[in-house]
Image: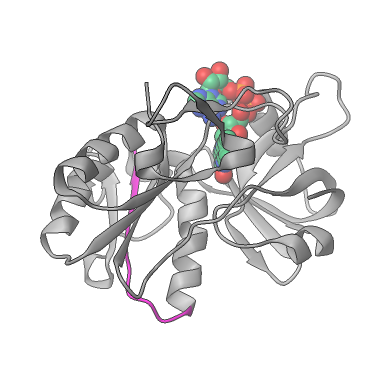
Amino acid sequence: MIIDKSDIIENTQIAEGIWRMVFKSVEIADRYLGAGQFVSVLTDDNWEHPIRRPMSIADVNEDKISIIYKVFGSVTQALTKLKSKDYIDVLGPIGNTFNVDYDTFYPILIGGGIGLSPILNLSKCLVQKGISITTIIGAKTSKEHFLQHNPNKNMFLSTDDGTIGINGTVIDALNIVLKGVKNPKIFACGPEPMLFSIQKILEEKSIPAQFSVESYMACGVGFCQGCVIPKKQNNEYYLVCKDGPVFEANEVKFE
Ligand SMILES: Cc1cc2nc3c(=O)[nH]c(=O)nc-3n(C[C@H](O)[C@H](O)[C@H](O)COP(=O)(O)OP(=O)(O)OC[C@H]3O[C@@H](n4cnc5c(N)ncnc54)[C@H](O)[C@@H]3O)c2cc1C
């Protein structure tokens, strides 16, 4: 991984509170291994924002890297102020990648909230390879969606308030999708309660899965130890930044 002061090409609001930023980094793009990896960004040299924030890579197109972010607090708010031709300080690429054994399994991709970012990246890679997939993207309400609900093309949106797509969470959508799929394997990213609920379904139905885990973290390189997640098998812990962010679903425990 390297640190690069990358030129911003585009920074646009794409839904309510959701932005896409595209920046140029030849060196990070060269080192990029695949969907699941993330970068960690510093918005500016302001002492008020001294800690980097992890952001999943949503797309890599030659030397152009996209992230999709939701405005949560001060750093993501500051990100929205950046414009084309400004620069952003980016550390990356960090972490491992999804491992899709699509010869054996039918991939079901699930992104909840801002967890959609690595899922859309993975979806694009699989579609480019001609692999059939089903994608489920969940949000609280239609205003947070920027994609089209299209079950005929195996793209399912869900909303907690029922304003678009399946009325409910990604779990409601998953239960519908699972009825029509043989030999599924799930690839999911989203808030821990969502991953926990999916994990329970997987255990009941013996379905394999990989999760990309978005724990709160400070350094992204293993120093701060802030992003620990318990191992399922014993009382030890993984570091999401160094051991993940992608884990087999049966390796991690959500508390
Ligand atoms: C590997 C990884 C990939 C990520 N990818 C993305 C991405 O693609 N797009 C995106 O928008 N965000 C992503 N995140 C989350 C993002 O890094 C945080 O939302 C970030 O901290 C926001 O910074 P902020 O200063 O705006 O808000 P902060 O002030 O840091 O946070 C505001 C509040 O939001 C809540 N919060 C923030 N982050 C988290 C979290 N990870 N888990 C639970 N609660 C949280 C906390 O309650 C906090 O008080 C990712 C995190 C990880 C670990």
Q: Residue at x 62, y 22 (%)?
A: 226
What x and y, as percent, mark residue 29?
74, 63
Q: How is the image coloured?
A: one colour
User: Residue 65's quadrant in the figure?
Assistant: bottom right
The one of 181 and 253 positioned closer to us in this rendering: 253
| 179, above or below 164, in the image | below
Q: Is residue 149 visible?
A: yes
Query: Which quadrant of the picture is home to ligand 1?
Result: top right
What x and y, as percent, mark residue 85?
85, 54
Q: Residue furthest front?
A: 234
44 relative to 226 in the view: left or right: right
Which region shows up in magenta? 129-140
247 relative to 138 in the view: left or right: right
User: Residue 153's quadrant in the figure?
Assistant: bottom left
Q: Residue at x 69, y 61 (%)?
A: 32
What x and y, as percent, mark residue 183?
21, 65
Q: Residue at x 29, y 53 (%)?
A: 208
Q: Quadrant of the C terminus?
A: top left
In the image, residue 218 lies in the stretch drawn in magenta: no
What x and y, as percent, mark residue 149?
29, 59
Q: Residue at x 76, y 42 (%)?
A: 82
Q: Is residue 81 visible?
A: no
